[in-house]
Image (tube, rainbow, N blue to C red):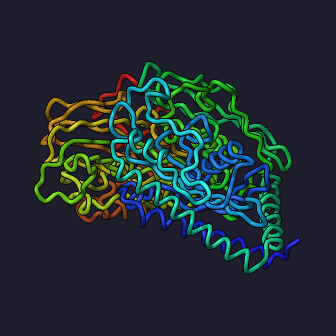
Amino acid sequence: MADAITAEIVRNQLDTIADQIFETMCRSSPNSVVNEAKDCGAGIYSYDGTTSKMVSRAGIIAHSFAGLSSSQTVLEFFRGDLHPGDALLVADSYHGGSHLGCWNVVVPIFFNGRPRFLTGGRLHVLDQGGPIAGAVNPNCREIWHEGFRIPPMKLYERGTRRRELWDWLMANNRLPDITEADVEAMIGACRVGERQITELVERHGLEKVEESLDWIFEYSERMFRDQVRAWPDGTYSGSFNVDTDYADHTDINIEVAVTVDDDRIVVDFDGTDPQTDGLVNSVPANTIAYVSIALASLCPDIPVNSGFFEPVDIRLPEGTIVNAVSPAATVLGTIVCGGQIGQAVMKAFEEIVPERVGNVSIDIANNYCVGSDDREDRFLVASSSNPRKFFFWDMSPVAMSNSAVYGHDGWGAWATPFSVSRPANNEFTEVQFPTIYHQAEYEIDSAAPGQWRGSPAYVMRRTDRGASNTFATFNSQSLIYPLPGYAGGYEGAGNFCIIGENADEAICGEYPVAQSYDPSQVIFSQSGGGGGWGDPLDRDVDAVVDDVFDELVSIEGALRDYGVVIDPVSLSADEEATVIEREARRADPARVRRGIGRERTIERARIQHRVS
């Protein structure tokens, strides 16, 4: 058995290698979703000849967890037929993937003639060969409508590039140049990891490294079991709804029961609604990833690896939205219903450890536009066959999902498990694509009220000048059921988009948009922000005054949402009037528990008929 010091040295070195795999992908890919928004993940996995285990990870945590399922799938498919120099690819919801847009490369690393480690890279490609250009077809009703399915295959075999497979893949993609470069970026990053893991084993010896892995897994398992024992035994329920599947179903319910029994946890989704005809179904790799994200977020001091999850039993009823069976569409399942799965689990834990809960999902107001870039000084050649064609995935409409947690306001853009991502730089985007931003900022009074408030909503307005033949696909969620508050905090404002603001408006909220549009019209989006934590009437008065000074809260909003009376001239709080106002609010059984920003969103998005 390895000693603790050596094991910790090995663990930290492997964590560093995972970071380098991730950064190599980000710096090598020409895809702005990767090199700017960092929508990718890396993993290092051990392999004992039967089972793959996650040792280290970097990047977006959902990619790393789903990458474990993809790795296990390709290992089982090629068992007995793996060789040094192989590079494997898989991108299929029903072959260990999460949806067709995320391509996963796996490289086996050999010692003493057998694969002992795997490096994995996973990223979101810009096009997946579906009926509609781009990553999301809002009209798909089965997996073949999503795009080109990629079962396990070898892109390199014994170090030799399989040209027929590369040509086949790129012939089924609208952006073969960028997609090929993305795949090469993943392979190159995995090779960087392979080289450094080889150096690590040469330094310490294979036996010592394998003993260290056992120590690493057992340590995380022991720490998590100790944590679970500290929680009260019992069964705790949580639920959350998906607004729509973009087909014929609304108010789709995800039910979860979390049972704590001594040092073990059962997470059971019995009672969850059936899979749907729309594009929001989740497969096990994705659902397990979001459950894992929630559990890891509750225990930030425990190293995250496969040992952590040994005490966890996840039960997914087949044929439900959390365990869809083929040929159900899954193209948005990674975010919807993935995010709602995470929220349902957190709602169950609100009953167990309320001081630790918060939002663990990324949210969506998807905005994907294609067309012709007619600028003479265009910067980005997107396709060698059609150099004027542009594919623009605007990440800014998904920029805000950070909720409050106990002791802290929402502090950034995406929720913490996704905070390695970042919105693309607007100024550089204007150089790359035929678009110009007229507004990109926080919206006043939109932060979800709470003792600690959520992040404010982010609003964007842009026109696509210099473009023609434009076509947009917009999908929005969390408008009817916005990101929730916890422990008495209020829900977020909600997400929606508008094509052609103040003209013939097409509002994307309840329904998807897939249509041609006038590039001179204003495209508007609101990313509604996370929920609050705790009763807003308990918020520190000085914190409310600070938010008024920072123009995050108006004087009207301070009174309406927090019961704080502020003098409009001095911008100071009237403490006596505030005490009286708050006492009256607490005693009012009809007290409104919805923020002013949420009320404005309901009115603007015209959803009064859908919300209670």
Q: Residue at x 31, y 42 (%)?
A: 368
Q: Position of residue 541 (x, y in %)?
A: 43, 60
Q: Residue at x 80, y 58 (%)?
A: 221
Q: Residue at x 58, y 55 (%)?
A: 87
Name the one closer to the observer, 388 or 317. 388
Name the one closer to the observer, 449 or 127. 127
Point out the residue furthest to the left here: 376
In the rendered image, is residue 449 in sight? no
Q: Position of residue 242 (x, y in %)?
A: 50, 31
Side (left or right) of 31 relative to 359: left
Q: Can you say which quadrant of the picture contains the C terminus?
A: top left
Side (left or right) of 424 relative to 386: right
To which quarter of the image does residue 37 belong?
A: bottom left
To which quarter of the image does residue 210 belong?
A: bottom right
Q: Position of residue 418 (x, y in %)?
A: 50, 55
Q: Position of residue 488 (x, y in %)?
A: 55, 44
In the rendered image, is residue 442 in sight? yes
